[in-house]
Image: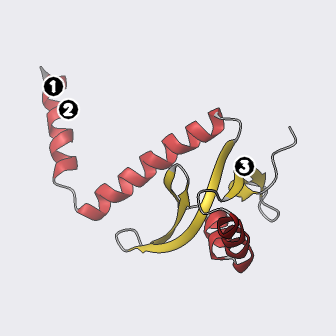
C-alpha cells in the first residue's frame, strides 16, 4: 500500500509544478527519446522545403522549425539552428523548391564530431554518409 501512495504523491508533485518546469522535463524526456531513436536509426533522410527559427519563451531557447514533405520537424540542436539561419542553406532549399514545389532538398540527419570539443552532434548533410 505504501508504494501506491508514494506513486500518487509523485504524480501530484508533477501536476502542481510550474509550467516552465513541466516544459523543461518534457524537453529533457523528448531529447532522451529522440537521441535513442536517432542512435538506433542509421540515417534519417528528409526532404526540406523550408526553415524557420522560433524562440521558445518558456525555456528561453531557439528552435529550428524544418518544413519537410512529411510535415514539420523541430530541433533544439545548435548546429541545426545555425544551418537553418544560414543564407547558404536557405538559398539551396529555395532553389530546389523553385524547381519543383512538391519536392525540396534531400538532406540527411547525421552525427558528426565537433571540432573543438570532440563531442558527437547532430547536423544536416546534403550528402549520404559513407559508412
Q: Which residue is mark 2?
A: 7
Pointer 2 local density, CA inside 10 Å: few below 14, some 14–19, many at least 20: few
Q: Is residue 49 left or right of 16 when viewed as pictured?
A: right
Which label number is shown at residue 110? 3
* Most foreground residue, 72 or 121: 72
Q: Is residue 126 above or below residue 4?
A: below
| Alpha carbon distance from label 3 to label 2 | 39 Å
Q: Nearer the viewer, mark 3 or mark 2?
A: 3
Which label number is shown at residue 4? 1
Q: Position of residue 2 (x, y in %)?
A: 14, 24
Residue drawn 57% across the image and 69% down it: 51
Q: Nearer the viewer, mark 3 or mark 1?
A: 3
Residue drawn 16% across the image and 54% down it: 16
Q: Secondary structure at mark 1?
A: helix
Give the quadrant of the N terminus: top left
Pointer 3 local density, CA inside 10 Å: few below 14, some 14–19, many at least 20: many
Mark 1 touching mark 2, by CB under 8 A? yes
Q: Position of residue 38 (x, y in %)?
A: 61, 41
| Alpha carbon distance from label 3 to label 1 | 43 Å
Amino acid at each position: 500500500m505504501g508504494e501506491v501512495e508514494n506513486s500518487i504523491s509523485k504524480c501530484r508533485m508533477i501536476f502542481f509544478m510550474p509550467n516552465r518546469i513541466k516544459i523543461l522535463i518534457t524537453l529533457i524526456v523528448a531529447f532522451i527519446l529522440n537521441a535513442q531513436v536517432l542512435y538506433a536509426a542509421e540515417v534519417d533522410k528528409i526532404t526540406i522545403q523550408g526553415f524557420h527559427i522560433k524562440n521558445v519563451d518558456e525555456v528561453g531557447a531557439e528552435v529550428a522549425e524544418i518544413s519537410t514533405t512529411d510535415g514539420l520537424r523541430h530541433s533544439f540542436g545548435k548546429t541545426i539552428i545555425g544551418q537553418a539561419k544560414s543564407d547558404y542553406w536557405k538559398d539551396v532549399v529555395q532553389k530546389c523548391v523553385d524547381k519543383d514545389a512538391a519536392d525540396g532538398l534531400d538532406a540527411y540527419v547525421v552525427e558528426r564530431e565537433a571540432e573543438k570539443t570532440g563531442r558527437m552532434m547532430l547536423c544536416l548533410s546534403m550528402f549520404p554518409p559513407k559508412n
